[in-house]
Image (cartoon, helix red, strand yellow):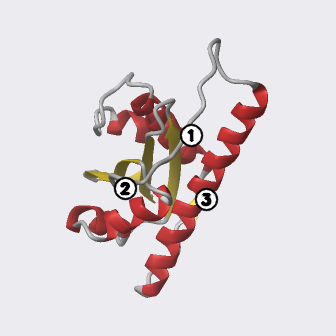
Amino acid sequence: MEKTWRKTSLTVGLIGVGVSFLTFAGGITVAQKTNIQGEIAVLENEVYFRVNQYRQSRNLPPLKRDSRIDAAARKHSENMANKIVSFSHDGFEERVYSTKIKFRSAAENIAYSWNIPSPATEAVRGWINSPSHHKNMIGNFNLTGVGVAKNARGEYYFTQIFILTR
């Protein structure tokens, strides 16, 4: 059976909303890292919730979250945030295969945002309003994973991978 691949990206930003970030010479403290990790987990959960909420409003079944897909999505977001890779879908197939999930089709949405008060809400809203992202969100998939990363400049990178298992 032939595999189906779909990839779409989105950049979101709002100029004029001020956000302050503190950077200390020598790196960040453990408490700061814990706060960032907590913020990231909240954003990942919010994306997952909002996408499923949207799917259910369209009478579609909710997607089940899978930690293996989360890990692949999170690593890609971290790599984009740290400028290891460009804001792109490069390596998408490898990310999907790295989950070790037997699948029939897969898709990926990515987003980038800065200077906005609700980055997860805006990422999902942007995907809903973009035909190619929307197609992935309402597609015939049963599993998903979400990864979010934030860099020192306060930029957020979002990756959501959708998979239909065999």
> Where residue 102 sits in the image (x, y, percent)?
47, 48
Q: Nearer the viewer, residue 125 or 141?
A: 125
Q: Relative to residue 80, is residue 5 drawn left or right?
A: left
> Where residue 116 sits in the image (x, y, percent)?
44, 55
Q: Relative to residue 60, is residue 6 drawn left or right?
A: left
Spot the residue most to the right.
Answer: 31
Pick whichever of labels 2 and 3 is earlier in the sequence: 3
Q: Nearer the viewer, mark 1 or mark 2?
A: 1
Q: Which residue is mark 1?
A: 71
| Residue 80 vertical position relative to residue 52 in the rendered view, above or below | above
Q: Relative to residue 74, is residue 136 drawn left or right?
A: left
Find out whether the residues at labels 1 and 2 contact each other: C-beta distance under 8 Å.
no
Residue 15 makes an appearance in the image: yes
Please report the residue visible at 43 percent of the width from the left and 32 percent of the height from the top: 81
Please report the residue visible at 74 percent of the width from the left and 36 percent of the height from the top: 34
Q: Nearer the viewer, mark 1 or mark 3?
A: 3
Pick whichever of labels 1 and 3 is earlier in the sequence: 3
- The Cα–Cα distance between marks 1 and 2, rounded to whole angstroms, is 20 Å
Q: Which residue is mark 2?
A: 104
Secondary structure beneath dot 3 equals helix
Please report the residue visible at 56 percent of the width from the left and 46 percent of the height from the top: 70
Q: Which residue is mark 3?
A: 45
